[in-house]
Image (cartoon, rainbow, N blue to C red):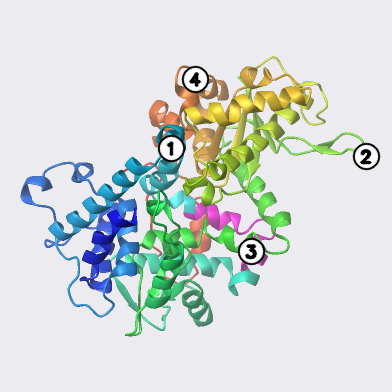
Amino acid sequence: MFDLYKPFRNRLRHFSIVESLFSVFRFIQFLDFEVPLPPTLGPPAGLSQRNRMRWGIVQWEFEILAREIILNGDPHGKNGLSTWAEIARAINTIKGLENDTWARHPKQEDDILYELVRIAHRQFPWQHGFSHPQILRYSRLFELCGVDALIRDEYDMESSELLQLGLSLAGHFLKNFRIKLPLSNQINGASQRACDEFIKRFSLTLEGARDQYRRTQSYDINWAYTFNPLRLKPLILLPDGTAICPIPMFLLQRVTSGVYFDLVAKKGFSDSFGPAVQALIGEAAYKSNASKVFTICGEASYGSAKQRKDTVDWIISDSTASLFVECKAARTRFKGTSDLSEQVYINREFDRIRLFATQIYKSLSDALDGRYPNWVPEDKPIYCLITTLENWHTFGIHVDRLVIQPLKKDLYSLGIDPMLVDKHPLSFCSADTFEMAMVVCGQVGIDAVFSKKTEGEYPQWALETFLTNNFSHELQAHPTSVFEDQWARLRPSGSGAFRPVGRHRHERL
């Protein structure tokens, strides 16, 4: 598609990189945090009265625009994309390039469901936004099972310093495009050494960013989905001794969910991170159990000395049903959510999901046979739930085709009744949605939630969407996070007011 792309590239060469990134920054702030646009960037009068979604502007297209500006803009130019008309023309070009590239794709019919997977992984995180519960959840996770020691070794700072600096800088970039260096910390307890390390670790020079984009750029069906280096290093160092952060959301993600990718190759990761996620999910269940309606059983070992097995991570029961919960710290691989040059990459991610599901049903089969030491089968429904730290977006009609049906064949080959999948339905969710589910189940009962989730079209819905559509009253009546007490740990004594950055869980654009 390079012939389609070339005119767009040539047009952007006339615009200043920094000045154009400033316009991208203003639109991202407007979309993410409702910071008003300046008059020069505001929409025409006839459009301004419409609902914002009808303007046709979305964050992921501005992410692409930022990439193209850095790749093709003039580092020494004076004039940026500084009007609504110029921005609209650039965004419409991006939309057109995506549409025209898909039109040239020779495997449209075969790849349409895979394209839906890509769309979900690109768009839904932006639509969901960055929430207060996410900050609090990672703050607590970093304290569990030795994860704090891994962070200290990797970043040469405490996990609290990492979060404080990330949140404070994000707060600065809520209103300011630049920050003067060296960073002078007057907000929280992070040391000057930690400040210097933070800037060093999470920044690129403008030329370095340009080089990284050249390495990742692809002129084919993956053009709009290539990895953005700003997700790893959200800050750009400028020659005048300042730094900019074109997409502040990336900074918030970098010091929370992005930590996983720095730690995953470290010695001791598997002994710490997975158990920490399991412990985090257990804490969320216990903290949601203020009214004592749940009986919560943690993992236990069973079997012979030579063939020891572990039960499911958590069994949460009430008077109506039991919920078998398996926790997974694993993250999706980038190619498995973005690369459509071959179906194999996305298929591999669904293979991983199927392995998670096989594990939980193998364990459930043993439980129903009376082999668990900590749980006895009862005459009430059982539901299975795989909970991942971050959202794998495991929903839709492709899940039945790529996970559920092959899962039944796998269970049959293992000598396990494949009807277990129908008798004890499986749901998927992130840690964030798990907290929501526990809040609702604590009020209406486990069976009232998960029996309804198996009806009609709901099995194809994401659990979060199902909960917000069917139990909005129960969700609004309770705090947005079960880890609210973590704010006190992120606010050092004597630091004054600490303003959290991000949306509450239920805020929507």
Contact, mark 4 vs mark 1 (Cβ under 8 Å): no
Mark 2 vs mark 4: which is more N-terminal?
2
Please, what is the dominant secondary structure of the magenta stretch?
helix
Q: Earlier in the sequence, mark 3 or mark 1?
A: 1
Camera-side residue of 449 and 418: 418
Question: How far is disc 3 from disc 1 in space, using C-alphas?
Answer: 46 Å
Which residue is denoted by mark 2 in the rendering?
Answer: 305
For the residues carrying marks 2 and 3, which lies nearer the camera in this image? 2
Give the image location of residue 466, x and y in percent. Answer: 44, 29
**Given the image, on which type of amino acid does mark 3 rest?**
Asp
Distance from the alpha carbon under mark 4 to that under mark 1: 37 Å
Q: Is residue 282 above or below residue 383?
A: below
SS of the residue at dot 2? Answer: loop
Which residue is tagged 1? 107
Q: Amino acid at mark 4?
A: Lys
The amino acid pointed to by label 2 is: Ala
Residue numbers of the magenta segment: 135-151
Say which label, 4 or 1, has the lower sequence index.
Answer: 1
- Three-letter amino acid code of the residue under disc 1: Lys
**SS assignment at label 4:** helix
Q: Position of residue 447 (x, y in %)?
A: 56, 21
> Up-down: is 471 above or below 95?
above
Residue 489 picture location, percent across and down = 53, 62
> How many residues crowd around disc 1 within 10 Å: few (fewer than 14), some, or many (20 or more)?
few
**Callout 4–callout 3 Cβ contact below 8 Å:** no
Q: Are marks 3 and 1 in contact (CB under 8 Å)?
A: no
In the picture, the quarter occupied by the C terminus is top left
Residue under the point 58% across and 58% down: 260
